[in-house]
Image (tube, helix red, strand yellow):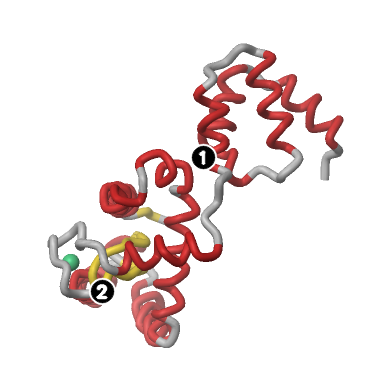
Amino acid sequence: MLTKEELEAVYKKFDDDKIVKLAMDESKSLREDAVPILEQEIIRRNLDDKLLEWIKWERNFFKGAELESIKAVIKNSQCTECGGKDSEIKGFNIHYYSMFDSTFDANIIVCERCGKRARKKSYIKTATLGWISFYGIISVPLYFIGEIIASFSRENTSKEIIESFIFENTGLIREYGIENIRDLIYNSNLVQMKSDEITE
Ligand SMILES: [Zn+2]
């Protein structure tokens, strides 16, 4: 691990774009003592003050009672997919195996009904298109065995997906407020679903 002095030297060498990118995208994951060094660099270079504010938002992590209350808001929010409010909102890992050994993997936050529907669709895709692959004969059965194993930990997966969503969106939730969390869920689902089929 770099010492504080080494880290200062590294940040000094970065160009402005890299400092902005670090502040915008990675300040959440920085180690505690790196944050003041980054802030100093922003001030020294006269970069936009808003970056300092953003870092504060991003690192103002949700914990304890506040975290629990956000989870409760998400759980009872309106589904971004069907607009329904009567089925609990959960985190779902949707993945399938498709043609030519391509795979799809997304973590979405939707109501139980929409999540189950998406999972069913991914089973059908795997069971049909998955065979049109060089490794289909191995990968398709492995996929379904994996699904059986995954079914034992669905509640836990849902909890992890929601916690990770809250962490990833710390700054945005701070900025826009918990009352607008549905828009952030909508965006997050959109980004996840766009990750498209990746050919390995
Ligand atoms: Zn729904």
What's the residue at 37%, 53% (across, down)? Answer: 198
Q: Nearer the viewer, residue 104 or 79?
A: 79
Q: Nearer the viewer, residue 191 or 172?
A: 172
Residue 65: image location, x then y, percent: 50, 65
Residue 6: image location, x then y, percent: 84, 31
Q: Quadrant of residue 5?
A: top right
Using the numbered discs, state the Cα–Cα distance from disc 1 to disc 2 in whole angstroms.
29 Å
Q: How many marks?
A: 2
Q: Which residue is mark 1?
A: 57
Q: Quadrant of the N terminus?
A: top right
Compared across the picture, whether 61 is left or right of 44 comes to left
Q: Quadrant of the C terminus?
A: bottom left
Query: Between tags 1 and 2, which lies in front?
Result: 1
Q: Is residue 103 visible?
A: no
For label 2, count other residues whose C-alpha is less than 10 Å away and answer few (under 14), some (14-19) or many (20+).
some
For mark 1, give the secondary structure: helix
Residue 144: image location, x then y, percent: 35, 82
What's the residue at 63%, 20% (across, down)? Answer: 42
Residue 32: image location, x then y, percent: 72, 44
For mark 2, give the secondary structure: loop
Q: Is residue 115 above or below residue 35?
A: below
Q: Nearer the viewer, residue 189 or 80?
A: 80
What is the three-letter code of the residue carrying label 1? Trp
Q: Is residue 7 visible?
A: yes
Q: Is residue 194 above or below residue 57?
A: below
What's the residue at 44%, 71% (across, down)? Answer: 159
Say the numbered circle drawn on residue 105: none
Between disc 1 and disc 2, whose residue precedes?
1
Q: Is residue 197 above or below residue 55?
A: below
What is the three-letter code of the residue carrying label 2? Glu
Q: Which residue is mark 2?
A: 88
